[in-house]
Image: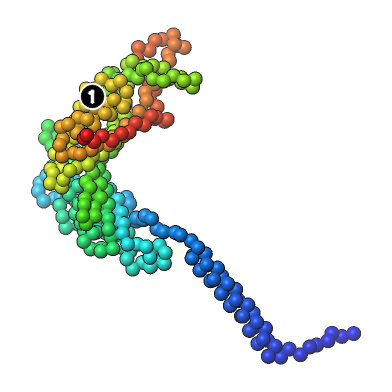
Amino acid sequence: MGRKHFPFSIYHLSFVIWKQSAKAKDRRLKTKLAIENRKSNMSVILSQNNYGKSRVRLVKVNRSNENHELKDLNFNIQLEGDFLTVHTEGDNSKVLPTDTMKNTVYALARQNDIVEIEKFALLMTEHFLSNNPQVSRAVVKITEKIWRRIKVDGKSHPHAFIQCGDEKRATKIKATREKKIIESGIDDLMVLKTTDSGFVGFIKDPFTTLPEAADRIFATVVRAGWIYTSEEIDFGESWNEARRLLIETFAAHNSLSVQQTLYAMGERVLNERKEISEISLSLPNKHCLPVDLSRFEMDNPNEIFLPVDEPHGLIEATLKRG
């Protein structure tokens, strides 16, 4: 018995397509209503936002005289302001591209001398605020690798330099149209002294294995940041003097704890540099542990040590004038 063949008209096909389209339209409508209902029941706000360009590298050589001047800088730029719609609607009309921020570094560096990084960071924040009404706050951080002139026959070479370890000079400017906060400081300054440091009288609970030490190596990598009271400051002279005071105090202080030395360092800066209103210090304790040589039938009169980077203690504090 053969199959029955049913007529399939163009009208039947049109009806099927219309029905499928109506169902799809109904699904879209239900989805839209569900989203709108969910939105109406949500209470979400953009409480904070910032964006910018990080790790923008710049080397500038000033060749205006025989003694060339070298600047080796790293920039971090962040903007805050009226950027709600780029988050909620994808509207980029108020967004300054981060690539433009990078280009701004190079253009302003070409147009202006860079003597003190604080002054250049202030110039950059003023540029972003002046040219972008949607920006309410600009933050520019600059870190500077320190190069010094090579000595040849006792004289400073005019265009040859040597880098001074990992130490960096740093500044961060936080600027609005009404106020500027100028922070400067030091990153990655490694210092060490072989005596005049101890740590005794601490808590000893069931898990304490650390022995007391009346005479130990004290090594740390200083990170210091201080806030200036004004823009009208000789930033270079102030930075060099604050650095000198920190280093001298570390060397001369008879340390009973890292905390005590940190306090003494910050206290001296505040006492002697009136243009600084507060200072924050971070001193990781880079341990040098005495090596037990008794298995070799040798003594160790506090001379043989094993340097240990991790784990390490981390001591931090901020000091202000009372």
| Residue 8 on image: x %, y % | 73, 89
Q: Is residue 268 above or below residue 40?
A: above
- Place residue 46 in its image quadrant: bottom left
Residue drawn at (30%, 20%) of the image: 256
Mark 1 element type: helix
295 to the left or right of 30: left
Q: Is residue 72 visible?
A: no
Q: Is residue 191 above or below residue 209?
A: below
Pick the residue in front: 159 or 101. 101
Q: Which residue is mark 1?
A: 251
Instruction: Look at the image and tell me in which quarter the N terminus lies.
Output: bottom right
Picture coordinates of residue 234, whole percent (x, y): 12, 43
In the shown orientation, is residue 88 left or right of residue 215?
A: right
Q: Is residue 81 above or below residue 236?
A: below
Where does the image place residue 304, in percent across and percent down from the top left?
Answer: 36, 17
Residue at the image point whose x is 28% and y is 35% from the top: 318
Name the residue located 19 percent from the left edge and 33 percent from the top edge. Answer: 270
Q: How many marks?
A: 1
Residue 275, how many percent across, how many down?
A: 15, 39
Q: Nearer the viewer, residue 16 or 73?
A: 16
Q: Amino acid at mark 1?
A: Ala
